[in-house]
Structure formats: C-alpha cells, structure tokens
Amino acid sequence: MSTQINFNGVIDETAVISVFDHGFLFGDSVYEVVSTLGNNPCFLDEHLRRLRASAAAIQLEIPNSDAWFKEQIEKTLAAARNPESYIRIVVTRGTGEIDIDPITCDKPNVIIYVTPVKAYPKENYENGISLALVSIKRNPREALNPGIKTGNYLNNVMAKMEARKLGAADALMLSPYGFLTESTTSNLFFVQAGRLMTPSLECGILAGITRDIVLKLARENGLLVEEGRWPGEALDNADEIFLTGTLKRVMPVTRLDGKPVGDGRPGPVTRKLARLYEARVASLVHH
Ligand code: PLP
C-alpha cells in the first residue's frame, strides 16, 4: 500500500508544488474526489464531466483529454498497489506571480493523488452520525457558486471546526438567505411522512454525483421525492436524515444539535436507499 502523486503526468511520491502556484496562493483551482471498487474508479465519467464544468465556470482551460486522465489514473493506481484507493484530482491555475490576476500563470498544474482509502467506521452506518447546524453559512451562489467544486473550501473548513466544537461529527450549513444547503463535503436528505426531501440546486449546493444517483434510485423505487427550499426548522419534524457523498456513500444522521432524529436509529428509507446505492456501485464492477 502506498500514496502516489501524479504531477503533470509524472508519478513521484515526493512531488511538491511551487509556493507560487495560484491554487496554493488563492485557492484558484478545481478538484474532484473519486472512490474505487475493486481498485477501479467509480463514476469516473461523471467526475471528469463535473471537473470540466467547474474549470469552465472559473475560465480555467484543462489541456488534457478524458483519455489522458483515465490513463494517468490507471498508471497511478497501479503504482500505488492499494486494495482500494482514494483518488483526488486537482487542477490549479498554475504557477505565476504573487498577484491575484491569473494572467501570469502559463499553464495549469494537474495533480492526481492516489492514497489508501480510509473507510468510515462501520458503526457510523449502523448507529448514524451527529450533525450540528452551524453559524457559518454556505457561500451564496452570487459570490462563489457552491456548484463549482473549487479549492476554496475555507467556510466549509470553519463550519467543520464549529461542528467539532459543538461535539458533532459534521456541520450542516444554511445559505445566507436562511435555507438548508448541505454539509461540509456531502449533500443533505431528510424524510418526513415517507417523503424524501433534499435542497434543490438553486439553494446553493454542489450537484453531488451520489445525490444524483440516490435521487434516481428513489424515483425508480416509487418514493415521493421533493427537491426544494426549506428553513433549518424543517428538520425539527424529520423522521430521518442522511448525507450522501463519494466517500460517505449513504450515511445516516441520528442526532441533530444533540437531539435524536426520529427514534434515534437509522430509519427504513435511509437503510433502503443505502442498500440500493451499494447495489448500484457493486453493479459497476460487472460491466
Ligand atoms: N457537497 C460538497 C460541498 C462536497 O464537497 C461534496 C463532495 O465532495 C459533496 C457535496 C458530495 O458530492 P459527491 O456525491 O459528488 O461526492
């Protein structure tokens, strides 16, 4: 098992980045996190599509083709020799002057990290995790659209720290307009009277790839689904809450602000969708 870094197509586990890189200096970068099954990347086409959409939204031109990314990821996975890997793709504006203007950056830096995956403990899935509604807000879409997956995660970092201070595992953020958005690295779902609800993209969230799959699975399985806009208080009456993300998959939330959610156990809708999602991921290796 090892950590391997692919830096602009060269694998070097001791790779370092310039202190003049604008990703480092200004958070001027985009990224993706990809998980593996059987050490093969899951939903890689979807992640590459979102990476390109994020890059386009910040006017960053990625010179490499999807075929190039796939080949480099495969090479790096082979070099790392892990049973399962965590893959992080980062594309920065590149190295330039210490000036906010990206015009001095000649070309993007493309970094692919491959490291042994750190799976969440089984008890998180069996018992659920705790969340805290924090005071730090998710970015408004008019400032830095959370739909763009950039290296600018400082408010999420601060939300995470605030949640920890409140004794919770992770944070739930409202938009500056007071509507539910998402957690620091995952999307929010809740269940009320058998209906599945999740904040709409208009609330200012990342269009999670896991979110998308869970929504499809829910609709295919006859659940009533609502994408909408709710204040934080909407969760007071939630029977179930869960989070979705590439690494968390479907993660039950059983405590919110120190109080139990529903009966304090992962609920039936959460468990059903978790099962369906696991089956969907497992089906990837048979293709
Ligand atoms: N929301 C945020 C802010 C994230 O950073 C992430 C994942 O990285 C997600 C949601 C979940 O997205 P996905 O399911 O594509 O991993």
Image (cartoon, grey):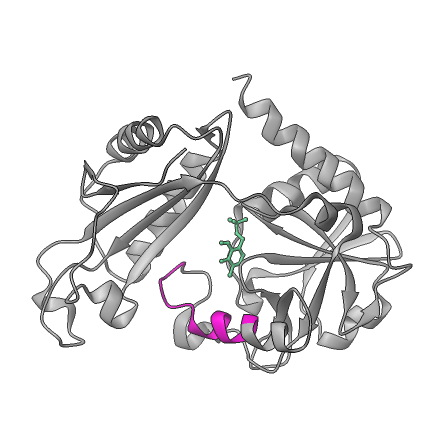
Q: Quadrant of residue 200?
A: bottom right
Residues 125 and 147: in front is 125
Residue at image position (69%, 38%) is 217
Residue at image position (53%, 68%) is 204
34 part of magenta stretch: no
Q: Which residues are magenta?
A: 149-160
Q: Tell me where residue 117 appears, x and y as whole percent.
A: 49, 41
Q: Tell me where residue 128 appears, x and y as whole percent.
A: 76, 54
Q: Tell me where residue 79 appears, x and y as whole percent.
A: 30, 29
In the rendered view, does 187 fall on the left or right side of 151?
A: right
| Residue 247 shows up from this direction | yes
In the rendered view, does 157 fall on the left or right side of 52?
A: right
Is 145 above or below relative to 112? below
Q: Tell me where residue 20 appears, x and y as whole percent.
A: 14, 67
Q: Residue furthest top?
A: 286
Q: Quadrant of residue 176?
A: bottom right
153 part of magenta stretch: yes
**Quarter holding the N terminus?**
top left
| Residue 223 shows up from this direction | no
Residues 159 and 244: in front is 159
Count of numbered circles in the view: 0
